[in-house]
Amino acid sequence: MSKLLKVLVLLFAVALVAAACGNDDDDDGGSAAPAPEATEAPAPEEDMAEEDMAEEDMAEEDMAEEDMAEEEMADGCAAHTDDDVRGVDKENGVITIGSSQPFTGRAAVAGEGLIAGIIIAVEEVNANGGIDGCTFELVWEDDRFEIEQMVTNVRKMIEQDNVWGFVGTAGSQAIPSTYPDIEAAGTPLWGPVSPADQDIQQVYLTNPTRTEQGRICIDHFAEQGATKVAAIGQDNELGEEAFNAIDLQAPVHGMEIVAKEEVEVLSDAVAPAVLSVIDSGADAVLTALDGTQNGLVLDQFHEAGFNPLVCSDQGSAGAGGQTTVGLANPEAADGYLGALQGALPDSDMEFVQHWAGLWEAYEGPGSESLAPNFSLQTYSITRAFFELWDRLDGDYSYENFHATAEGMADDPILIPAMPVLACGPLPGGHSCASGAGISEYDADTETWTQVREFLPPAS
């Protein structure tokens, strides 16, 4: 082999060894020329997945917190009430409602029980946590059974106390006088106790109208064999309803209407009306008077030896309590009939027994009332109001209240001590209850007994 060829072969071998040694040195971390700065290599797929999951978890956590915040807002008082509404305090979660009652004066026996029933219902709902995050504050005023005072009370509660609406207001002779103020303010009046029947947007009647109760009294007269019927009513819408009842129902039974007599509101001068009815020879009398006037009528009939059947609507009869019969002589009151808008307070139904326990423990205004029947009545009315309030779903606008209330015909409110409440739209739909019972007073035991089931008038 030539020298040149030997040199070339040697150089080639050295090159191969050097290359191999260089690779080994790199793998072992030996010195080498610095490599150019490299860009960051992409993370392995596993690391990228972990980062994505972490970001998703954080996003879900944020969304959950937002949902919780929204739920807290949705659970707050008046959550779906967009605008400011009278009597709705969103910040403090309080709804203010009002009522005017004859707490003193000639109808105090009834008024004490009436206000007590509302207070008991309000205290009960608040003790149970309220409704949809709201508790209720009741503002009430004593109207002394005087028309001007009731109007003053209603204006004061609207303008100064800023009430959302009224519940269980009583005083048939005075309630219609408050309608202009109620309409102007838009404040609903739920369950006024035995008012005149009027188609007013703000007024919802939760008891059978006095006209309907009067018709049912006449049905009962006919069942007892009466053939001649008379009526004595106040010279106002209360009396008009009694006269309407007798005009509508007496012909249904072929009864003769022999007298219609008027008595002035709040007047004790009932003798002229009594004498006219006695002279008419009526064997049954429908009255639409206050408790004091009814007591006087019963006494004067008895003193004259005149003993017809006498029946009044529940408000003026005070059926279940002593409102009227406690003012008359026992002999005169015996057998007195009263229409029933709701259950008697000694009923054994579970709802009434529940109220009775609350009444027994109650020590607030009206707790000494001798007419617990009125407490049961307004307790039932207020419970129905709270049932309707629960259906508003946090939207306490008047518009939503009317829409919800007028939809009750398809979804009635069932309060066991009351007739079924199925309000509908106007005209006519705000008379929400139909049918009444009849109760009879026994002077010996000083008790009332229901003698006719809750039925609509015969037609």
Image (tube, rainbow, N blue to C red):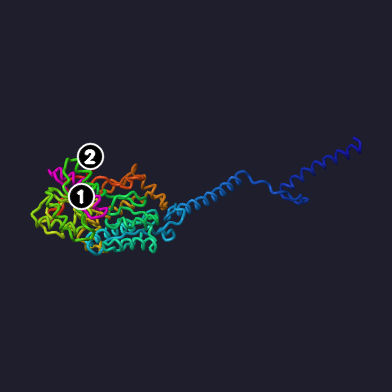
Residue 269 visible? The answer is yes
Which is nearer the eye, 206 or 235?
Answer: 235
Q: Give the spatial CA distance, label 1 vs label 2.
A: 18 Å
Q: Which of marks 2 and 1 precedes in the sequence?
A: 1
Q: Secondary structure at mark 1?
A: strand
Q: Position of residue 384 (x, y in %)?
A: 31, 51
Q: Position of residue 294 (x, y in %)?
A: 18, 56
Q: Position of residue 287 (x, y in %)?
A: 19, 52
Which is nearer the eye, 204 or 320?
Answer: 204
Callout 1 environment at 10 Å: few (<14), some (14 to 19), or many (20+)?
many
The stretch drawn in magenta includes residue 227: yes
Q: Position of residue 118 (x, y in %)?
A: 29, 58
The disc at residue 339 is: 1
Side of 58 relative to 407 (left or right): right
Residue name at image x 33 percent, y 43 percent: 409
Indicate the quadrant containing the N terminus: top left, top right, bottom left or bottom right: top right
Indicate the quadrant containing the C terminus: top left, top right, bottom left or bottom right: top left
Q: Secondary structure at mark 2?
A: loop
Which is nearer the eye, 4 or 214?
Answer: 214
Examine the image and state in which quarter residue 291 appears: bottom left
Side of 163 relative to 242 (left or right): right
Residue 445 visible? The answer is no
Query: Is the residue 394 above or below the residue 156 in the image?
Result: above
Q: Callout 2, which amino acid?
A: Ser
Callout 2 environment at 10 Å: few (<14), some (14 to 19), or many (20+)?
few
**Residues shaded magenta:** 213-241
Residue name at image x 84 percent, y 39 percent: 12
Q: Callout 1, which amino acid?
A: Ala
Examine the image and state in which quarter residue 327 appears: bottom left
Residue furthest top in the image: 1
Q: Nearer the viewer, mark 1 or mark 2?
A: 2
| Residue under numbered circle 2 | 459
